[in-house]
Structures are given as C-alpha cells and as structure tokens.
Amino acid sequence: MTFLIHTYGCQMNVRDSDAVAAALIAAGHRLVEDEAEADLVIVNSCSVRGKAEDKAIGKLRLLCVAKRENPRRMVGAMGCMAQRLGEELFRLVPRLDFAVGSRAARFIPQVVADLQAAGGRQWVAGDIADSDVPTGHVGAGLSEFVTILLGCNRRCAYCIVPTVRGPEYSRPAEDVVEEVRCLARKGVREITLLGQSVLRYGLLGAPVWPAPAPQGAPFTEPFPRLLEAVAAVPGIQRIRFTSGHPAGCTEELARAMRDLPAVCPHLHLPVQSGSDRILKLMRRGYTAEQYVEAVDRLRAHVPDVAITTDIIVGFPGETEEDFEATRALMRRVRFDNSFVFKYSPRPGTPSAEWEDDVPAGEKDRRDKVLLADQDEIGVAQNEAWVGREAEVLVEGPSLRNAQMWSGRSGQNKIVVFPPSDGVARGGLARVRITRARPQTLYGELVK
Ligand code: SAM
Ligand code: SF4
C-alpha cells in the first residue's frame, strides 16, 4: 500500500512515526507525500491538551470521509490519544480501521496485513510497560532522533503522559550507541537523545551499563556516560537531548556539556511556573530557587548555554501574584525561548479533580503577556550575539532566500549566511554574527 503518517505532538511522536514508517517500508509498503495518493493514512496523536485530541479526532474523521474517493483507503490511529481512548475511539470515529496503544506501534505492519486479508477493525492495546524500542529510521538526514527513555514516572499533577506512555524504562546504553553508530555510518551528523525526563536515564530499573565506570573515569553517572559514549561515535559532530528536569542538572552533567565538544550548549528545561506554591501543587519536585540553582550550575561551566522552557498559565488556583512570580523568574533566568501553554484539565490526572478556576480570557491574557515578555528577552539574547562567532551545522540553502545558506548554532538558533567555496551541507562552519532578529541570526563566514 501507499501510506502517509500525520504526526501531532512532541518529538517523541516524530520519532515513533519515523520508526513505524520504516517498519511499513520494510513490510513492502511505499511512503508517499501526498495524502490523496495514500491508501493507508495513520494519525500519530497527542493527548497532552484537550485541543490536541480534538485536532487528531477531527483529522481522523476527515480521513474517513475521504474513504468515499478511495475504496482501498485504510485509516489508523496511534500515539497518546489512541492509548487514552482505546476502543472508545471507534465510537468517536466510526469508520476508523485500527488503533494501537503508545507502546504497541511495532504491531502496525501486522495489523495492516490482518485487515488487508480479513477486513474488520482492530484495537491493539499492547502492554503499557513494554520495553521494546523500535530502532528503524526511514532515511538518514543530517539530524536524527534516538529514543533513550520510554514513559515517565514523575506524575506531575496536570500531566497525562505517565498514564498514556506508561512507566519509565531506560534502554541499555549499548543498544543506544549501536543505533547511533548505524546512523552515523549513513551520514547522520547530529543526534537528539529523547525522553520525557531524559536526565533520569539509567537511574531506575536494570543497569544500563554492563559495569560501573572504571575508577577515575571522568563520568560516572549513567546519562553523562552515555553522552561520552555517543560523542565517541565516529562522524557524530553534535548531540542534543530533551527534555531536562532540574533534579538531573548535576555538576557532572554540566562538566559533560563543557568537556565534550559534540554536546550542544542547549538545554530544554521546562519550569512550568515561577511560583513555589503552584510548583508544589503541580508536584514538580523543585522550588523556583532550586530551578535557578540548576541553571546557574550549568551556566557556571557552560556560560553560553541556551536555556529554553515550557510554562503553563492558568493552572488551578494560579493567582495574579503567582503569575507575576513566573514573570519574575522569566526575567531572572532570561530564557532563549519559552513555549507557553494554557492549562487544560486532562481526565484522570490529579489536577483534573480541582476546579479549573482561571477563566479562559484570563488564561489568554497571561499567555500573551508571557509571550511578549519572552519576545523582548529573546531579542536581547539574540542581539548579544552580534559581533560574536557561532559554530553552525550547515544545512544548505535557506528556505526564504536560496542565495543564502542556513544552519543551526549549538544554541539551536537559526543562522543565515552567504555561502562560500568549501562550505558543504553537514559541515561545521564558523559564522560571525552581524545582525539579530527575534527568530534568526545573520552573519558572515569566518575564513
Ligand atoms: N516531559 C516533559 C517535561 O516534563 O518537561 C514535557 C511533557 S509535555 C509532552 C510538554 C509540555 O506540555 C509540558 O512541559 C507542559 O508545559 C505542557 N503540558 C503538559 N500537560 C499539560 C496540561 N494538562 N495543560 C497544559 N499544558 C500541559
Ligand atoms: Fe508529564 Fe511531568 Fe513526566 Fe513531564 S515530567 S512527562 S510534565 S509527568
């Protein structure tokens, strides 16, 4: 069959879709870009906010309507929403052909074969504690995601992720390194290590390393050791990882970010709120002060480190004073970028039992205020780069202006520059920044 996967949500979903696409290709199906050409369309769904679920359901319904034009059309759902709703999804989308749970994606080729042979519909729940991590990749771009940790055990009060993605499981380090080696041989230069709380890698369950670090080794904690091992893979020039948690921002992590040149000076470190009272209700496990200390620890070793974050506005009981505490924390930390989310109660989470008492209009206002604050800080952060040199992983001609080339700095900022002989896609170039815009830096190659 020809097939296409629509992906909503986070980078873990992007990675899962890629692995499913690779498995479908291995089973003889063909990936297409145009939805009208696809016999099989899968929606990889997100459940983190109500709106994300509405979007996925709307898309599934539209895809089913289009079955009229293509009688071969098969429609499937995977990901967090499919896990949360299970068979209920067939009631909401009556002509849906299959749905698989969040840790059951590897069964999709079999489900498709069964339905082709016998028709009908299938719900495959799988085992929510399954530790099988699909390793296939469709292609090998410059940059690829590698999942190192499944699920989450933190149970923040507002979050559906632990329910829909199951318990935390860390892959053995040797498996991760082997996947990275394989990608590097195909030309991949940048690896992003993924996990909901990625710094918890190797802290729970069976040891991820076959033996403790030797005496005197520079890194002894499981995650910094993994960074060291991935950095040693020939061809890998850059390593990123997401998402972090202040509890994982150890002295050793900061040293690994400083001493391993391949590790990018960037950390996505969701703070969620700057109010201790709200952080406690959210069960985040840190105070605003402890969050700032974690950032300071990283900055002490890696002064240029870019810190990006997630913030929730309108959590139950969030007062104007709590909100102002978040604004104050934003000014104090000076994030390079912030993703602001309006609180959305998720059924089954602890906070869904509490009154969602911040009115929608007020959530909107707080959202806009924080985004405006962040814009101001972001522009200033970018302007501070003017006159300095950034190391850029060259991606090729810029999307907006083919005369110019672009790439990303270690801090994950888009850098645009005029190309020159000897600079090729996949290479690292030094660019002196001459101009800053809110989302982009412009500069010239340093010879
Ligand atoms: N595991 C990551 C972490 O804890 O930092 C991110 C998890 S979630 C996929 C991404 C972001 O969605 C969270 O950081 C949070 O800001 C937001 N989020 C999660 N649950 C939410 C909810 N119920 N309402 C609004 N935003 C939510
Ligand atoms: Fe959700 Fe918290 Fe786990 Fe992140 S750490 S996935 S916000 S429970």
Image (cartoon, helix red, strand yellow):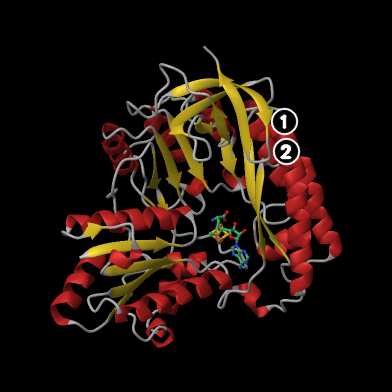
> What residue does disc 2 label?
379
Image quadrant assignment for residue 92: bottom left
Horizontal relation, residue 9 to residue 112: left or right: right
Tell me if mark 1 has few (under 14), some (14-19) or many (20+) residues whose alpha carbon lies within 10 angstroms of its own: some
- Front-most of 412 and 162? 412
Image quadrant assignment for residue 359: bottom right
Q: Residue furthest left?
A: 117
Q: Residue furthest top?
A: 447
The answer to whether residue 225 shows anywhere in this view is yes
Three-letter code, disc 1: Glu
Q: Position of residue 149 (x, y in %)?
A: 42, 51
| Depicted 33 relative to depicted 362: above or below | above
Q: Marks 2 and 1, how far apart in space?
A: 6 Å
Tell me if mark 2 has few (under 14), some (14-19) or many (20+) residues whose alpha carbon lies within 10 angstroms of its own: some
> What residue does disc 1 label?
383
- Label 2–label 1 contact, CB within 8 A: yes
Look at the numbered disc 2 and say if its residue's Cβ is closer than 8 Å to ligand 1: no
| Depicted 372 relative to depicted 27: above or below | above
Q: Position of residue 272 (x, y in %)?
A: 67, 56
